[in-house]
Image (cartoon, rainbow, N blue to C red):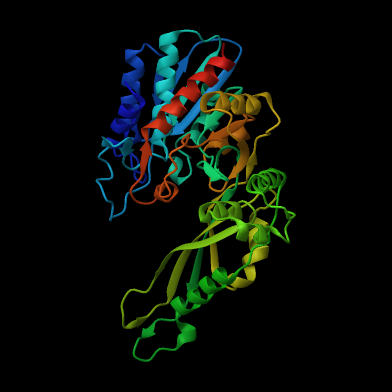
Amino acid sequence: MKPEEILSDLIKIQSVNPPGGETTAALYLKKLCDAAKIPNEIIEPAPGRGSFIATLGVGKKSLLFLSHIDVVPATDGWAFPPFSGEIREGFVYGRGALDCKGLVAAEIHALLTLAQEGKLNGKLIFAAVADEEVGGYLGAGLLAQKYPEKIRADFAINEGAEAPILIKGKTCHFISVGEKAPSWLKIKTKGVAGHGSEPYLPNNAVVKMAKIVQGLAEYKPRIIIGPEARYLLEEIARMAGYKGSIDETTLDKFFAKLDDPGLVSYLSAITRMTVSPNVIQGGVKTNIVPDSCTAEIDIRILPGQDKQYVMKELGLIFGDAEIETLQYGLPTISSGDTEYYKLIVETIKESLGDVPVLPTLCAGATDSRYLREMGIPAYGVGVMTYRLDAAMKASVHGKNEKLDIKSLQNKADFLVQLAGKYLS
């Protein structure tokens, strides 16, 4: 099967998390591997929440291809059915095309290709896991905790890199060497219920929450340029012809010179803690003063920051509100000064031509953190394309998600070359 056909089939399987249903997708992958006589298994810690693992070859060297088979829900307002998996005009359409079933399709296509060629002198592990979209506890987290030997490898390839960008006519590609971490909080304000016709605003929990949200909107996080971000920024500045210095005091001045809002948004995210109040719930009826209100805040921290840093920065804004931690982790980094990273760069250049390739941090979180905590270097790859669609990045967790077939084929070819070079 072609990788676009596999991707189309996977999109049609609605493994939306929550609630999940990843086992159906795992069974589809199992059918492909069974037909190719590749040893495989499904690990299902809860009904319908299966992760798929296949292993090809034996030897001292080992490589892990990691991806996830769950997707986020599709909201209303799409220009096409979100789970159609339609193939037309050079694209595959549907939820998960970019995040992350495109990578699943490329990885298993590479696995099947390598199995047919039969040239590996080492072990290639393919793991398509459940539950990444809500923390990975039933997927990669469970495998790392209970079945670490099933996924242990010299290094791993996963999602996480930014989509390519165009700088002065050159397409620049990225490899994610690390990522920020979530420090999600649930904030609760309390008030005194009363009749809405005689309101006393200091008793209104929604009014209290509004002040907190306004404080978060006005918060100016401190700019911190870590070593990975510094190298990235300096290389982008060089490619863009920027002659000024790059440091914490001049960074936003440099951003003002860039004409790519998406790039500026990403670079801003990896040089400061980000805070986004995304869910607010309060009140039960129009004529009742609300006595409680909750807000869920998406906070992402940089390497070197932790929960204590978050509270030091935002504690005054929260005041006497109750605070509950929804999700918390520490940022993780894999060294860019390894044979594995250099091999990935070399293979990308062989696959796509002599293109600029730079290390990046992922502004979000991926399952790579579980691998790094096991001591496995993990590197994220992105969309390997020259067909840069301005709406592509916005469609991840948004509307009208799609992936061009050329990118999918490029990624599948890259994975075949990488595994072939390392496990030959």
Percent across and percent down for residue 264 are: 57, 55
Percent across and percent down for residue 122 are: 55, 12
Q: Is residue 309 left or right of residue 163?
A: right
Q: Is residue 360 left or right of residue 190?
A: right
In percent of the image, x 51 and y 71: which residue is there? 213
In percent of the image, x 68 and y 34: which residue is there? 335
In percent of the image, x 37 and y 92: which residue is there? 198
Q: Nearer the viewer, residue 224 or 242?
A: 242
State the residue lying farthest toward the bottom.
Answer: 198
Percent across and percent down for residue 363 are: 56, 48
Percent across and percent down for residue 183 are: 57, 54
In percent of the image, x 31 and y 36: which residue is there? 11
- Tell me the quadrant of the picture where the N terminus can be found: top left
Q: Nearer the viewer, residue 305 or 118?
A: 118
Give the quadrant of residue 22: top left
Q: Is residue 369 left or right of residue 195?
A: right
Q: Nearer the viewer, residue 386 or 241?
A: 241
Whether residue 116 is situated above or below residue 225 in the rendered picture: above
Give the quadrant of residue 144: top right
State whether residue 292 appears in this view: yes
State whether residue 45 appears in this view: no
- Tell me the quadrant of the picture where the C terminus can be found: top right
Counting the numbered discs, the total is 0
Q: Is residue 48 left or right of residue 250?
A: left
